[in-house]
Amino acid sequence: MNGGMEQDVDPIRPGAAAEAGRTPGVLQVLPHLAAGGVQRGTVEIARALVNAGWRAIVASEGGPGVAALEAVGGTHLTLPVARKNPLTMWRNADQLARLIERQGVDIVHARSRAPAWSAAIAARRTGRRFVTTFHGTYGHANALKRQYNAVMTRADAVIAISEHIARHMQAIYGTPRDRIRVIHRGVDLDLFDPAQADGPRVAVLRAAWDVPDGVPVIMLPGRVTRWKGQHVLIDALARLDRRDFCCLLVGDDQGRDGYRADLDAAISRYGLGDVVRLTGPCDDMPAAYRLADLVVSASTDPEAFGRVAIEAQAMGRPVIATDHGGARETVVEGETGWLVPPGDEDALAEALKNLWCPENVLRPIGDAGIAHARARFTIDKMCAETMAVYQELLAKTEQ
């Protein structure tokens, strides 16, 4: 298929960047640059590349994040790389190979499955090192899906965003451990800074969400979708023998009207209408975390990493999370928060009682969360470890 087009590609030999005396270039490939953790991480890595004197190129279908990418010095190429049509993917491979040649790319980094197929072909044709980031467990119920997903494991190095994902890759795809690099996602400490988010910003949200003064606040941030566990939290709240709290479910339902209706019905059935708010999306999450006294992540399916738990800890808020997936790596039981079995309303209700602990108990837990996030889960750390992978592969190329 399209064999004639492949002949037009004039590959650059591995190591040509160093030999030519120019700066190395990294091409990141992902479906689009819209909102989300993958897109934020792409821009963050682009910034780190530019700051290190490298060239940062991104291929995607575009989106609001293009402006952010260009603001940090990155270059964007618009390609239909989100599409799964085999012919389109093959054409994308041709265009990516030409881009690699034209831009003098040394490393190709794919961040999603459909783009990875095209990127893998282009990297192989041009003799470039190929990196992937495995962001989730993906659907793998049958052999066809596993075969489709497996492209993410067929790289010179595979970045897993947690040990949970690394173990998943080994168990499902047989990925050799020596090919996996675990690099946790990072939180922006300039943005998620407790000192910057208190005061007027918190007051704005308190007024907008009609949060009464003097009552403790429970918050569950996340998309309003069933696996995020808002219904589990509501069931747990109903098991409490008190109502002197306010619970905020912060997130966009993204048109999931049926699930939203189920939540509204449960709130009404339990008589929680005065204390539970579905706020919709929030543009100032640092202030939202500071408004909360306790942050809950009640996901019923394992989080690949779970950014909420780290953001909350960075803002000095104790966390209750479900005891599976990435939360086991981000929440220190009894020190920065508590872990409860997934879907266990009784256990969650028991953990929620910590909300009424004395301040001299809760504050040290919040302070420990800040220290934990700053020591282990920062953007700078994530970027430095990713750059180390690039440098490792570049060194191998030049040997």
Image (cartoon, helix red, strand yellow):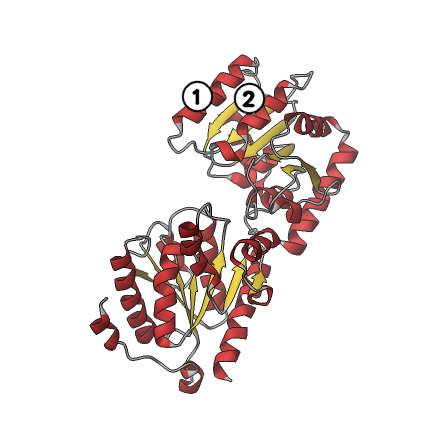
Residue 30 left/right relative to 89:
right
What residue is shown with label 2?
A: 276
Q: Is residue 209 visible?
A: no
Of all residues, the one furthest to the left in this rendering is: 4
Q: Secondary structure at mark 2?
A: strand
Of the two numbered discs 2 and 1 in the rendering, the one whose residue sits closer to the viewer: 1
> Which is more N-terminal, label 1 or label 2?
1
Identify the residue shown where x is 67% and y is 47%. 370
Which of the labelled discs sits on residue 261, or is there none? 1
Identify the residue shown where x is 63% and y is 24%.
236
Residue type highlighted by circle 1: Ala
- Image coordinates for residue 375, horizontal then vertical, percent: 67, 55
Seen from the viewer's position, the closer of residues 54 and 84 is 84
Question: Based on the displayed image, in which of its 4 quarters is residue 148 positioned?
Answer: bottom left
Where 86 sits versus 140, above or below?
below
Q: Is residue 85 above or below residue 348?
A: below
Residue 122 seen from this side = yes
Q: Amino acid at mark 2?
A: Val
Q: Percent from the top left, x then y, of residue 164?
A: 60, 51
Residue in view at x 47 percent, y 62 percent = 132
At label 2, counting other C-alpha atoms closer than 10 Å, the crowd grade (few under 14, some 14-19, many 20 or more) is many
Q: Is residue 56 above or below residue 16?
A: above
